[in-house]
Structures are given as structure tokens and as C-alpha cells.
Image (cartoon, rainbow, N blue to C red):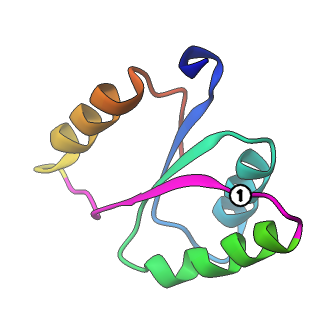
Amino acid sequence: NQMSLIVALIIGTSDGLEDEIAYQLLKKGNCVLFCSQEGNKLETIIQKLNAEEIEPKFSVLDPIDTTTVGSVVGQINEQFGKLDILI
């Protein structure tokens, strides 16, 4: 059921808190959308989950700024119909 899925958007992951939040959300089977210029930072999280035999539901979106935030929100609404968490 798409409505019971938690959809989280994380803007700019780092090596700290955002990574741990993303890991915990993905571990629980939620969908995490990333807006980051550094997609390679996600590799560590993905490898960690794959090692635990968890297939993460995630998508990497283009970095956003004030001119592109509307299109990102539009993409999320179109694909998921909602956004539950913004980090």
C-alpha cells in the first residue's frame, strides 16, 4: 500500500546524522529520496543495507535550490502522492 509507505526527502547527505537517519529509514523499508551532489556518499549506506540483505527503496534526485524545489516537489507528488519527512 503506497499510502502506508513513509516517504522521506533528505537534502544533502553528510557523514553524520543524515546518513544514520537514512540508514534507519531504509532499514525499516521506507522510501528515501536524496537530493545530493555527491551520490557516492550513498554507496556506504547502500552497501551496509545490502550486507544485511535489505534492498533499499531510494532515489537520487538532482541537487535543489530555490529555482528547482518546485520541480522536485512535483516529482514527489506525482510518484508518491505525499512527502512525510523532510531532512
The relative height of residue 7 versus residue 67 in the rendered view (above or below) is above
Residue 54 is a magenta residue: yes
Asked if residue 60 lies left or right of residue 68, the reply is right
**Image quarter of residue 65:** bottom left
Query: Outermost residue toward the right?
Result: 52
Total numbered badges shown on the rendered structure: 1
Front residue of this view, candidates 26 and 37: 26
Counting from the top left corner in percent of width and height, residue 87 is at 54, 46
Question: In what element is the residue under mark 1?
Answer: loop
Location of the N terminus by quadrant is top right
Residue under numbered circle 1: 55
The relative height of residue 72 versus residue 49 in the rendered view (above or below) is above
Residue 70 is a magenta residue: no
Span of residues in magenta: 52-65
Amino acid type at image mark 1: Glu
**Image quarter of residue 48:** bottom right
**Mark 1 burial class by Cα count in 10 Å: few <14, some 14-19, many 20+:** some
Counting from the top left corner in percent of width and height, residue 66 is at 17, 49
